[in-house]
Amino acid sequence: MKKKWAERMFSLFLMVLAVSAYWQTLNLSVTESKTGLLTGPAFFPQWLAILFFICCAIIFGKTYLQAEDVLLAQAFPAPRRLLKIFVFLAMIGLTVILTPLIGWLGSQFIMVLVIEVALEKRKWASAVGISLTAAVVVYAIFELGLGVRLPRGFLD
Amino acid sequence: MGLFQSVFDASINLLFSVNIFYTVLGGFIGTLAGALPGLGPSTSIALFIPLTFGLNPITGMVFLCNIYQGCMYGGRITSILANIPGDAPAIVTCFEGYPMAQKGRAGPAMGISGTASFIGGMVGLTGLMLFAGPVSDFAIQFGPPEYFGLMVFALSCIGILSSESPVKGVAMGLLGLLCGTVGHDFVSGAIRMTYGITGLIDGIDLIPLALGAFALSEVLFILEKGEKGAFIKSKLTFKNLYPSLEDFFRSKWPVVRGSIIGFLIGVLPGAGGTTATFIAYAVEKKVSKSPEKFGTGMVEGLASPESSNNASEGGALIPLLTLGVPGSGGTAILLGGLMIWGIRPGPMLFQENPDFVWYVVAGLLLGNIALLIMNVGLIPLFVSLLKVIEPYLLSAITVLCIAGVYACSRNLSDVWIMLAFGMVGYFARKLDYPMGPLVLGLVLGPRTEDSLRQSIMMGHGDMSIFFHGPISATLLIVGLGIIFYPVFRYAFLAARERMKKSRP
């Protein structure tokens, strides 16, 4: 994807975010009921959403004014590399889903194993070693060192 | 003398307690993190905040501040050895440091830059000691309108200065402020901006946002590039490490100039180390008798930016500690850490808890000495360690991010928030949106809204209250002027162009 289009799509996404933020404030009051002053819960976020929208609209508009050669630089990597990013994000999502079921140690072990084998192209034996070490070391630091009780899954 | 006595006493207490361990450890971690391309102070502090929960606030703050300080030192290692800056302020180090390394003078470049960093750091900390008290005494007069003006000023400064496109910086600052309004409104009790998601009722915490925007997005960049293990090529031994007397003599005045520039720029919100290093380099080139040699390995062009980078750190701590207004993404995350420990920086901190401030300053002073020893004497060790760590960076950051976010709230829904900000951060950084204003907006958001509300109540709804006092009026006018300056400039230039064309 070219940078100009990426810029437009991202600023459009931010504009949608601004509109949705404004919409979220519509069921709240701008003024405070007792005093009638502009100190209600909607006042500040409403103004922020408007200003945010204006900024994003300027960014969107600027893509039409800037020189082509600056904007036509490649913004994103080849699809294969993007796939790696997608796999990585999906792994984190899967880890969050798996953690309450199989516990912290198990989910972290699986996540690091997949990252090391699929993304880092490491051999199975060393990937297992790294995954086990990462999961156990972080577990020890947080659970034993800092007293944070990490999820144990079905053992809870 | 009371001030120096307080810092001296605090230094002695730190020296003979467990805090010295955390001081050195923070500096060591910071140096390594600063040297790893992409891992700047913001990412490193965000990664390590969850690990400080078990510590007392002084130890935790000393540890985090020394990570911050260590990053300032570490960034130069890969700049000199491989022409790859560890963090943004180290870009300028490449200009002269790498040519020196190419000429076989990597060791002296390391020695000079380490010493210049140390002197700059000391100048910054001395400035912090001297000016923090008076600034906090002045800030005691601030009421809600002044604070609102200050917030607008800080956000506009960081928005404008942190990016090449000012409007992108301002947009990120506004997005951060909007994120700060998510969840419970503590005045009315209303639940706002949650989109019906229960995980957002308690609001968006700093740690998931910062780890997502900085650390996770960095992991995505590492994945995208797919390059590892290639950044340290030069050989460095203890023997060829030390600069000559001539090198020291040539760098004497550049270090002085760089330190002063760095400190003054560091005080400005948003300017930070990157701006300081570029200005210091430009000034050095301007005053040099042989500016044409810059870019070929001039010691002056290396020493001045290095000292300005470290001096800016002391300057940046002044608005953070005295006004509660951070000047950069890194100090915004430090502010978040302070709030997690229940410490609210601002003028009252100097009245109610002065020891805390002097312990932090003492920790930084001791840390600076430890960092000089580490960064001049132990460079070969750092290079070896970097080679070992780098291949495992991806998994290490990911696991630490998830554990850190979970440890903050004991809630897995925050990991989803981190994931969302990781994706937004990746795309935003790709398109040159700065992340610093986003974090700053989130941290300052609740306080900005409180100040606005209190001011409106004080003025009984009259908005002119912001212009009654000289301080709030000046801050607001300057802040808004900074934001609208590009618009006015564009309109002025367009009008002038039209006039030129219309003339026969």
Image: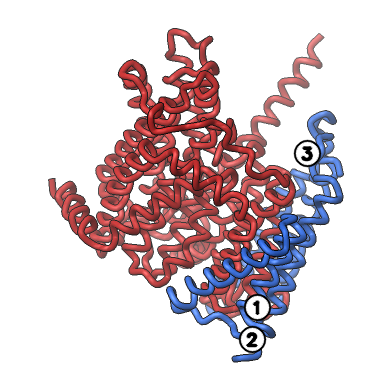
Q: Nearer the viewer, mark 1 or mark 2?
A: 1
Say what amino acid the circle numbered 3 marks. Answer: Lys
Which image quarter is the N terminus of chain B in? top left
Query: Where does residue A74 sit, x and y in percent of width and height?
Result: 82, 38
Which shade is chain A? blue
Query: Where does residue B89 sit, x and y in percent of width and height?
Result: 51, 37
Q: Are marks 1 and 2 in contact (CB under 8 Å)?
A: yes
Say what amino acid the circle numbered 1 marks. Answer: Gly
Going from N to C along the chain, the mark reached first, 1 or 3, is 3
- The chain drawn red is chain what? B
Going from N to C along the chain, the mark reached first, 3 or 2, is 3
Work out whether disc 3 and disc 2 sit on a shared chain.
yes
The image's mark for residue A153 is 2
The image's mark for residue A62 is 3
- Residue closer to the observer: B297 or B352: B297
* Circle 2 crowding by C-alpha within 10 Å: few under 14, some 14–19, many from 20: some
Rounded to the nearest angstrom, the CA distance separating label 1 from label 3 is: 49 Å
Rounded to the nearest angstrom, the CA distance separating label 1 from label 2 is: 9 Å
Quarter of image, res A39:
bottom right
Rounded to the nearest angstrom, the CA distance separating label 3 from label 2 is: 51 Å
Residue for badge 1: A106
Q: Residue at x 38, y 29 (%)?
A: B239
